[in-house]
Image: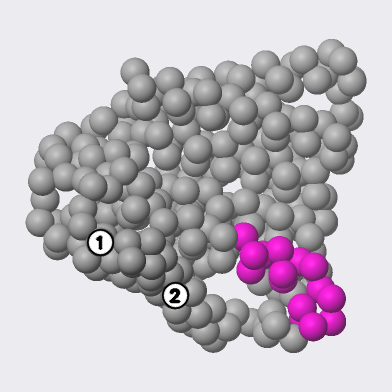
């Protein structure tokens, strides 16, 4: 009997998660400039990748409310629904903010509709990273009331989204200063290596920040934010140093690209992505258990 009850409870989370995802899918269809489903029927990979990243990220966000929670099934289910609604709202806001901040010199949706796989790669990885950050905001227990917990989760979800946007802007400006061209233009030209580099950066930073946000929120919002900022800054600095060292090692072993053509080498970007994700995991765990 207990096994059947456990199965029903697990099924409840899955059903509710799918329903929340269906709501997000319906709204996303309304706010995009093209019908992704029609494009996918024709075998268009870019819209499918873009949507797949968003859906996976949304599920990651929703499951965060169950991480490290010791509450009863009823309380967990109620928080799961509330957090799912918050996640949908933040992801819808992200749809517009990503267009404004990430690839701001590009009409993202038009490029995805035309089959620009580089834009789809960057957006998909950004959505997955955002899902991690929102999930971290939803995780853990605390002494707060239900509504205080919802407010705290919403606040940190917004902070996570804003943090990703700031990181991208700094990365974009640094790229322009060093290589004398905008990374946006390379990705708009369907440079998939450049997209993977930018996307792996955002996803790696999200992994580090997940460990900085995740856990119980028992202090005041100010104290929680200070803890997040302290741990997050340390993690971002360490990860930045690791990426720079990896680039220098790759330059020695593989050779430098000429100015203006950097990151047309997909192999370099794949290696850098692997190093970044691995370093992010180690750094994040060190922060979490410090």
Asked if the stretch drawn in magenta spans residue 221, the answer is no
Residue at horizontal 89%, vertical 20%?
255
Question: Residue 174 at x, y = what percent?
Answer: 61, 33
As drawn, 39 above or below 51: below
Indicate which disc, 1 or 2, sits on the residue closer to the N terminus. 2
Residue at horizontal 71%, vertical 59%?
119
User: How much space separates mark 1 and mark 2, taking CA atoms?
Assistant: 15 Å
Q: Categorize mark 1 by other alpha carbons within 10 Å: few (<14), some (14-19), many (20+).
A: some
Q: Categorize mark 2 by other alpha carbons within 10 Å: few (<14), some (14-19), many (20+).
A: few
Position of residue 51 in the picture relative to residue 251 (left or right): left
Question: Residue 68 at x, y = what percent?
Answer: 31, 43
Question: Residue 200 at x, y = what percent?
Answer: 65, 40
Asked if the stretch drawn in magenta spans residue 41, the answer is yes
Which residue is the site of mark 1?
A: 73
Residue at horizontal 50%, vertical 38%?
207
As drawn, 278 above or below 3: above
Quarter of the image where one finds residue 252: top right
Question: Residue 163 at x, y = what percent?
Answer: 42, 44
* Residue 9 visible at all: no
Which residue is the site of mark 2?
A: 15
Task: Name, please, the residue furthest toward the front.
Answer: 1
* Residue 205 visible at all: yes
Residues at discs 1 and 2 in contact (Cβ within 8 Å): no
Front position in the image: 232 or 79: 79
Q: Is disc 1 placed on a helix, strand or loop? A: helix
Location of the C terminus by quadrant is top left
Position of residue 104 in the picture relative to residue 10 (left or right): right
Quarter of the image where one finds residue 145: bottom left
Front position in the image: 68 or 207: 68
Residue at horizontal 32%, vertical 32%?
229
Give me the disc on residue 163: none
Per the rendered image, the range of residues in magenta is 39-53
């Amino acid at each position: 009997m207990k096994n059947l009850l456990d199965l029903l409870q697990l099924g409840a989370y899955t059903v509710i998660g799918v329903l929340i995802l269906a709501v997000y899918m319906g709204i996303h269809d309304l706010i995009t400039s093209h019908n992704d489903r029609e494009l996918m029927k024709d075998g268009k990979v870019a819209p499918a990748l873009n949507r797949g990243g968003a859906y996976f990220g949304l599920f990651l966000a929703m499951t965060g409310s169950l991480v490290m929670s010791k509450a009863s099934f009823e309380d967990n289910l109620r928080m799961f629904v509330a957090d799912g609604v918050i996640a949908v709202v933040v992801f819808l806001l992200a749809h517009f903010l990503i267009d404004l901040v990430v690839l701001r010199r590009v009409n993202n949706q038009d490029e995805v509709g035309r089959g620009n796989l580089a834009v789809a790669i960057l957006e998909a990885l950004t959505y997955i990273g955002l899902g991690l950050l929102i999930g971290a905001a939803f995780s853990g227990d605390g002494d707060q009331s239900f509504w205080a917990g919802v407010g705290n989760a919403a606040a940190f979800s917004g902070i996570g989204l804003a943090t990703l946007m700031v990181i991208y802007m700094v990365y974009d400006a640094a790229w322009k200063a060093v290589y004398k061209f905008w990374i946006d233009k390379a990705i708009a030209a369907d440079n998939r290596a450049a997209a993977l580099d930018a996307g792996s950066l955002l996803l790696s930073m999200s992994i580090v920040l997940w460990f900085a946000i995740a856990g119980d929120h028992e202090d005041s919002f100010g104290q929680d934010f200070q803890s997040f900022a302290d741990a997050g800054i340390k993690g971002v600095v360490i990860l930045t140093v690791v990426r720079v060292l990896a680039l220098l090692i790759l330059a020695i072993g593989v050779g430098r690209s000429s100015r203006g053509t950097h990151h047309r080498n997909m192999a370099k970007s794949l290696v850098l992505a692997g190093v970044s994700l691995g370093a992010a995991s180690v750094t994040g765990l060190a922060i979490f258990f410090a």
